Image: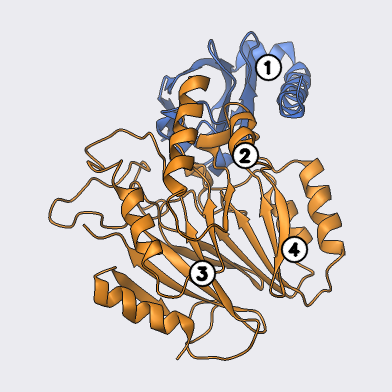
Chain colours: A blue, B orange
Amino acid sequence: MDRNRRNILAGGAALLAVGAGVSVKALAEDRVIPVVARKFVFLPGEISLKKGETVILEFTAPEVVMGFNLPDYKLRTDIIPGQVSRLKFTADKVGTFPFLCDIFCGDGHEGMAGKIVVS
Amino acid sequence: MSIHRRDFLKLAALGGGAVFASSLPGCASMGMGGTDEFYFVQLSDTHWGFNGAVVNPDARGTLPKAITAVNALTVQPDFIMFTGDLTHTTDDPAERRKRMREFKELVGGITNKNVRFMPGEHDASLDHGEAFKEFFGDTHYSFDHKGVHFLVVDNVSDPAARIGDEQLAWMAADLAKQPKDARIVVFTHRPLFDLAPAWDWATRDGDKAIDILMPYQNVTVFYGHIHQENHHMTGHIAHHSAKSLIFPLPAPMSQPKRDPIKWDPANPYRGLGFREVEAEKPSKFEITEFNVKA
């Protein structure tokens, strides 16, 4: 296993550790939004939230390692096939916020993006 | 009259398309003397193997035109640098190597044989630089030329756009041999700073590289990736991105998506080109941009 692969897996392990810190109660109460990252789209590509809403984005990638990056909220995670990655956050500002895949995944990677709309 | 000025006039006379020459941050005005002055040519983002007539119906003809223009320079540069995305990505390892083989054969037609390469994410991110190394050698290295210390920094072999701690340690050790007032040039593919993270125009750990460079007084970075000129300062460090030789991209965050700019039949090859960089003492660089012409 090369170093880059190890780094990605290490990042994934760290994320899971964070995920484990989310209480069962919180998981039960917060809205969970499944997001699938496949070549070369996020499904859904647009996520609508209400200001103040706390959600858990639950990612899967059926094909290759992907990344989810929401720069305006300084949130990102690796998405590793066979694992579920979770990001919990509160939509505390109104606007349209682009997200993207930030792990190069092939021809079409540059167009792999979406947006979160907070109203 | 400087070497640069002579070539500017020569290319202008040939219709070579010199379109811009001015002082920039980290750059100086024309006209100077000195034994350590020289210039190099930067070409970037050739994306050999790309197929998309809407943005470039002459995808296989654009790079040859640039090579012809470089070969026509009256006074040849000391060296030529390709700053990544030599080839367009493909999932097929055999096709990737075919494109690299074709690219290498094509640039073998450059008269000047002092040609250096580095990868972009299209070359290296899907196989961690394996194919690139087979054809072009190391993905990061340093060299010295006429009093300037050059570092080639790989921020693409990791598909997550990290330089990585190992390479950062190499950078620090390499630079430790240089005095703080050394003339240092960094070639890299992605911007080292957060130009537009929402468009993936950044390096995940680029801030660490800048921290390593910051103690050095005379540092200039030349990069590619964003298919257009951009000039930016992080403290006293100047960063200059180069045009592409396949299709231009929109200005950072100027529109919702970073879709390539469509080919304009009324202005073919608009936004495509290469540059000369003239190194002047003590630490200034004069940039001249050339557009590809039909």
State the separation of the CA atoms marked 4 and 2. Answer: 19 Å
| Front tag of 1 and 3 | 3
Label 4's element?
A: helix
Query: In the rendered image of this protein, does residue B110 appear above or below residue B286?
Result: above
Q: What kind of residue is marked 3?
A: Pro
Q: What kind of residue is marked 4?
A: Leu
The N terminus of chain A lies in which quarter of the figure? top right
Disc assigned to residue B213? 4
| B231 with respect to A46 (left or right) | right
Does residue B248 appear anywhere in the picture? no
Label 2's element?
A: loop
Residue B202 pos. (x, y %): 57, 48
Q: What residue does disc 3 label? A: B77
State the separation of the CA atoms marked 2 and 3. Answer: 31 Å
Label 3's element?
A: loop
Chain of the residue on which disc 3 is drawn: B
Same-chain check, marks 3 and 4: yes
Chain of the residue on which disc 1 is drawn: A
Same-chain check, marks 1 and 3: no
Q: What kind of residue is marked 2?
A: Ala
| Front tag of 1 and 4 | 4
Q: What residue does disc 1 label? A: A26
Chain of the residue on which disc 4 is drawn: B
Disc assigned to residue B161? 2
| Front tag of 3 and 4 | 3
